[in-house]
Image (cartoon, rainbow, N blue to C red):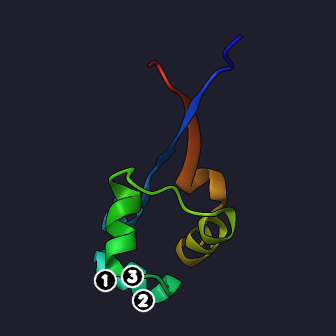
Amino acid sequence: MEGIRYVIQNRIKVLRAERNWTQADLAERTGISRQAVISIEKYKYTPSLELAFKIAQVFGVEITTVFSPEEDSK
């Protein structure tokens, strides 16, 4: 029996745009590389729970404002 799979959606690009931040700005604020920000935004990398909380903290919002699960239709 297969379980339900989830994809973790994120609103990082939208939140950055609302603040007029570049990917480099967010990278500097979170202490990660710009390439890591790009990978997270493009769903090529799912951040650790610790990093997800750090990103939410940097934006000044709850973690669920940045990240949310979505059922994978595959």
Query: Viewer-nearest of labels 2 and 3?
Result: 3
The amino acid at mark 2 is Glu
Residue carrying label 3: 33
Pointers 3 and 1 in contact (C-beta within 8 Å):
no
- Give the Cα distance between marks 3 and 1: 8 Å
Residue found 44% across the figure and 53% down from its top: 11
Q: Looking at the picture, how far across and down is residue 14, in whole percent?
A: 36, 57
Q: Looking at the picture, how far across and down is residue 56, in whole percent?
A: 59, 67
Q: How many marks?
A: 3
Residue 24 numbered mark, or none? 1
Q: Nearer the viewer, residue 16 or 49?
A: 49
The N terminus: image quadrant: top right
The C terminus: image quadrant: top left
Residue at the top extreme, as displayed: 1
Residue carrying label 2: 28
Residue found 46% across the figure and 82% down from its top: 32
